[in-house]
Amino acid sequence: MVKSLSPSGWSPAEPLGISYAREDEDGDLEWRSAALDSKNAVIGELDSPQNQGRVVGISIYNQAAETGGLLLFFADRTQVSFSPSINRRALALTDEMTDLPWYLDRMLPGLSAAGLLGYQAQDIAD
């Protein structure tokens, strides 16, 4: 699924490297970081049989737009969530609200090509 976002400019390579997580035995997300050149190895690790049935996550970044966030894959791999947390794009109307249409416009083509059947978008105030 991460690779399906590449044509729209999204990559696991963020300014400081690659950030990813996997669920540990206690159900907590264990965050790790890796060098930029290990992108394929990280994706391979997250897709490995040892992580089937576990929640995994990876930060994705759009270098041209200088924004990104956390892409979280739930244990059954039929649900994914995205939280814009790297230089979040705000609506021109108000900084308190996320420009969800901007993210959807740039992510849905790749996710749809990967088999996405629907989505739910919500902006949650801090």
Image (tube, grey):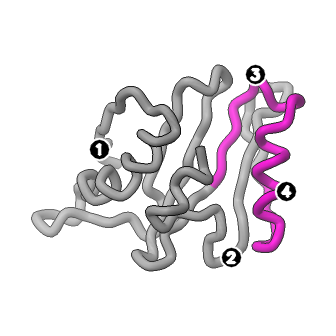
Q: How busy is the neighbourhood of tag 1: few (under 14 within 10 Å), some, or many (20 plus)?
A: few
Q: Position of residue 74 (x, y in %)?
A: 61, 28
Nearer the viewer's eye, disc 3 or disc 1? 3
Q: Position of residue 8 (x, y in %)?
A: 44, 63
* Mark pair 2, 4: CA separation: 17 Å
Disc 2 residue type? Leu
Q: Which residue is mark 2?
A: 16
Secondary structure of the residue carrying numbered label 4: helix
Q: How busy is the neighbourhood of tag 4: few (under 14 within 10 Å), some, or many (20 plus)?
A: few
* Mark pair 1, 4: CA separation: 33 Å
- Which portion, as a residue range, is magenta? 32-58
Q: Which residue is mark 1?
A: 123
Q: Position of residue 52 (x, y in %)?
A: 79, 26
Which disc, if any, is residue 53? 3
Which disc, if any, is residue 98? none
Disc 1 residue type? Asp
* Mark pair 3, 1: CA separation: 28 Å
Secondary structure of the residue carrying numbered label 1: loop
Q: Which quadrant is the N terminus positioned in?
A: top right
* Mark pair 1, 2: CA separation: 26 Å
Q: In the rendered structure, which disc, 2 or 4, sits on the residue that comes first in sequence?
A: 2
